[in-house]
Image (spheres, rainbow, N blue to C red):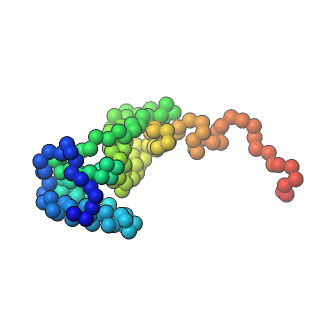
Amino acid sequence: NGHDYNLASDAGPSQSSLSEQEIHQKIAERLECKMSRNFQDADRIQDELRSAGVIINDGSKEWRADGQLFEKSSRSYRQSEHSEATEDSDQIQAMVDERTRAKSERMFQKADELRDTLFQDFGVKIDDRKGEWSVGGSFGFGDRENRSQMPGRPFEKAPGLPE
């Protein structure tokens, strides 16, 4: 079938608008695009498959078309203790969770769009290393925006360096 992806062992009956043969063709085409580093077309094909009800799990090299998502052990993000207060925390958390799912399903364009919407609509920045989100973008001492506020001695010019 031109690819090494298998139908998920726990998949139910297909609900896709594509035939199984068409699914295999698109998965093979997507894999060819990925192998030739044509990620834009690979993402486009993945979006087409998803629109047709086909979900791909690149980690396990499986696919399904039964309307179910793959179970992910994706990390959950929480609001930073340094975040500004907001009445929109439930809506923000839902969007952050949706972004996390998009990233875990390798739908990076959608994840980036959600990140941008969170920032534009709510002033939210996300720290992927800490697994936190913050209204106003503050994550406490050590984050890039607050380095100038870190305690410690002022910088001094090393002896012997020209002015």
Quarter the N terminus occupies:
bottom left
Query: Which of these two is toward me, 10 or 159?
Result: 10
Query: How many numbered discs sit on the rendered protein?
Result: 0
Residue 57 at x, y = what percent? 29, 50
Quick check: 92 left or right of 63? right
**Residue at 75% of width from left, 40% of height from top?**
154
**Residue at 15% of width from left, 58% of height from top?**
20
Q: On screen, 19 above or below 157?
A: below
Quick check: 131 left or right of 2? right
Quick check: 98 left or right of 25? right
Residue 19 at x, y = what percent? 13, 60
Residue furthest right as drawn: 160
**Residue at 72% of width from left, 35% of height from top?**
152
Residue 72 at x, y = what percent? 32, 41
Residue 121 at x, y = what percent? 38, 46
Residue 69, located in which quarter of the rendered image? top left
Quarter the C terminus occupies:
bottom right
Q: Is residue 110 visible?
A: no
Q: Is residue 139 visible?
A: yes
**Residue at 19% of width from left, 60% of height from top?**
23
Query: Which of these two is toward me, 121 or 118?
Result: 118
